Each structure stands twice: as C-alpha cells, then as structure tokens.
Image: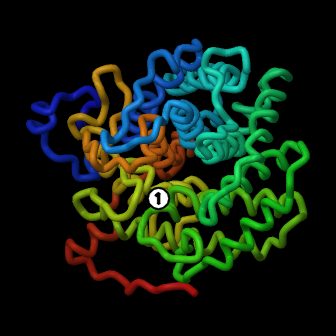
Amino acid sequence: MGIGLNATAVEVAAQKPYNGSQNPEDRKYWVNVMTRIAAPVLNNLSEGTLKKNMPVEVNPASTYDRRTVTYLEAFGRLMAGMAPWLELGADETEEGKLRGKYILLARKSLANAVDPMSPDFMQFTSQKYEQALVDASFLAQALIRAPKELWGPLSAKTKSDVINALKSTRNIKPTYNNWLLFTAMIESFLMRIDEGADVVRIDYAIKKLEEWYKGDGIYGDGPKFHFDYYNSYVIHPMLIDIVKTMVDKGLEKSEVYDTILKRAVRYADIQERSISPEGTFPPVGRSLVYRFGALQGLAQITLMDKLPSFISPVQVRGAMSLVIKRMIEAPGTFDKNGWLTIGFCGHQIDMGEYYMSTGSLYLCTVGLLPLGLPANDRFWTASPEPWTAKKIWGGVNMPADHSIP
C-alpha cells in the first residue's frame, strides 16, 4: 500500500519509499488528496463561515494585509483545479457519490461567494489590491472547465451575481505580463455564455503573448524571460482555454490554436522530462509554494489526451503520483485544522513571497487536473511504466530530445 493521507512522520519514515510503480490505487489517492485539500474551504464557504474560520498565514516579513483577497484566492484557485473532476458528475460508485457531495458544496460555495448579502461575499473589485483580478480569472476558468456542473444548474440569481462580480473586475488595470491573460480569461467566460464580452481585451492578450514567445514552448512573462513556472501556472493553460473559446466563436483562426497547442505540448514534454526518478522537480523561480501546481502544464495536456506519442499517460501518472506524495506527505504541509501552510515541501514560511497567503496555496490543485479523466481511462488503468528521467537514469537507450521553433 502507498503512504496514507493521515500517516504520521514516524509512519512515513517506516514505510518503503513509493517508487511510482507499485501502488494500484493511484486514482483513489489523488481523489483523497483533492478532497482533503478542498474540505476546509468548501465546508466553510458553503455555510458562510470561511472568513470566520480560515487562517491567513503570511511571511512575517510581509507588510501587506492579505485578508481582503485571500478568500477569493482559496476558492477561485481550488475550483480551477477541481472543476474537471466535478464535471464528471455524480454517479452510484463510491467516488461518484463523493463527487456529488462536492458538486453541491461547490455550487453553494459559489452562491455565497458572489452574494452581496452573504458573510462570505468576496471582494472582486479591490481599490487596495489588484489581486482580485487574478482569482476572479481562475474562477472564470473553472466555469469554462465545468459548464455542466458548476454553471448550468445555478439559479438565475446566482448566475446574475457571478456575471456582475466578474464584470466588476474591469476597473482593475492588469500589469504588463501574464496578468493580461486574467482579463482575457474573464472575458472568455463571458463570451462562452454570450454575456457582452470585451473582445479587445482577449485579442490584445493573445497578440502580446505571441510577441513574448521565446521559442521551444516557452513564453516570456512579459517582454523579458523569467526562469520560473508561470508558463505552467498561468500562460499555457489559460492561452489554450482562451484561444479555444475564440475559435469556437469564429473570432480566431484554428491555425492559431494549433500553434499554441503545439507549444503547450512541447512544454508538457519538458515538464515530464524534468521529474526526477525520485519524484522531484527543480525548485526554481518565484511562487514555488504552489507546490505541484507547478505541473499544471503537463496536467492539462494529459487531461486533453494530447501528450506526444513518445510519452504514455501512465508514465505521467507514475511521475506525478510520486511528486504529489512527496509534497502532500511532507510533515507540516497542513495545519492542525487541515488548512494548507506556506511551503514547497512541508512548512517553509520564508519561501512565501510578499503576495502569498493561505488562499494562494490552493493553486496546487491545478496539478490534479487528470482527475477529470474517468476512472476507466488508460491514464488510470494501464500497467505502470517508468517516466523519461527514470528510464534514462536507469540506462535505457532513448531517442534524443528535440526542440521546436
């Protein structure tokens, strides 16, 4: 058996290290990880007690009060990661019943988040912090990812409240970097539901990201290149969803989507190669406390079944399962009440930048996007295989890697 979610540090140390190939219950484990992370947020928000009970941890060196924005961070980011799993819908299996429970919690939470009369009404338009734009966009992305379960069944009032909340972010000026995609993502959702989208905001973001493309599947975060994981946290996943929306609405050429998808596939290839035989990846760049959210690029291409032919879904499952286990089982990852703590592998408070707080950390869930693949998908059912780095470091003769333009 793999390491249990509630294992103590002593129990973890006593067990044989998981090698990415011996645990037949990976999906069950991933579901347990997702629901363990989600439970405190959704249980409280659905009851209107999130602001009352959620801690707001920050780096002691930070002088920013994050209480205005941290709650929307937690909810928007959690939904962006959880949406594909919820979109599978409820069914009579054990997992399907659990999913049904969380679908209802998510809908109630959304209603409270956008209801001006709710004690948990969230700040979408902040004159003090522009952060609301970021997390409104993650919420919009969640609604694009789960239209049947998170949008369609909502009441007319809640839909109106969501639309008003998202449109209220239009007075926030995005910074000249990946933030352009946040405005575009919000407008893309409004376009999906035919609710007066501003096409110029979308088109501007697409054109700027094209200008900032550096080659080999990598975009600059703004005009300059930064060696971090923002291509995965934001750029590739949002570009895919934004451009697909434009193509579906007849406002962009399919060739543009094909190009950005090709680049995203190459980036996913690089991410898979970056996972070591031991289940680690380089801790480089800012925002590392998003933990395995850094692998969203690989996770989304896996969810889309667009992996390159030389990478099997099951080797991604093995690699990502080991990364997730190493991070989620690190002592101190959760506080005594089950909330995530600041850190990359455990509780590492100094790794949190000034803009980090408890809510920020829930972006880790975008690393769990493959849960949107049904339980009978080959990602979950195929016999284990070693991933690329494990093969190469094990002496397997492999083809050379190649770049793309």
Residue displayed at 32% across by 44% down:
61
- Pick the front one: 388 or 248: 248
Please name whichever residue, 271 or 165, is drawn nearer the observer in this view of the structure. Answer: 165
Left or right, 246 with reference to 144: right
Q: Left or right: 310 with respect to 328? A: right
Along the viewing direction, whichever of 275 and 158 lies nearer the viewer? 158
Neighbor class of circle 1 (other Cα within 10 Å; few <14, some 14-19, many 20+) is many
- Image quarter in which the N terminus is found: top left
Residue 370 visible, this orientation: yes
**Left or right: 55 with respect to 17?**
right
Give the residue number, with chain letter if any, for mark 1: 313
Relative image position of residue 326 (x, y in whole percent):
26, 46
Q: Is residue 120 above or below residue 261?
A: above
Point out the image quarter for the C terminus: bottom right
Q: Secondary structure at mark 1?
A: helix
Among the 4 quarters of the image, the one containing residue 3: top left
Q: Position of residue 46 (x, y in %)?
A: 59, 17
Measured from the top left, where is residue 346 in percent x and y? 25, 41
| Quarter of the view holding residue 90 | top right
The correct choice, above or below, for 111 with respect to 187 in the image is above
Compared across the picture, whether 268 is left or right of 121 comes to left
Q: How many marks?
A: 1
The answer to whether residue 383 shows anywhere in this view is no
Amino acid type, residue under disc 1 in the picture = Pro
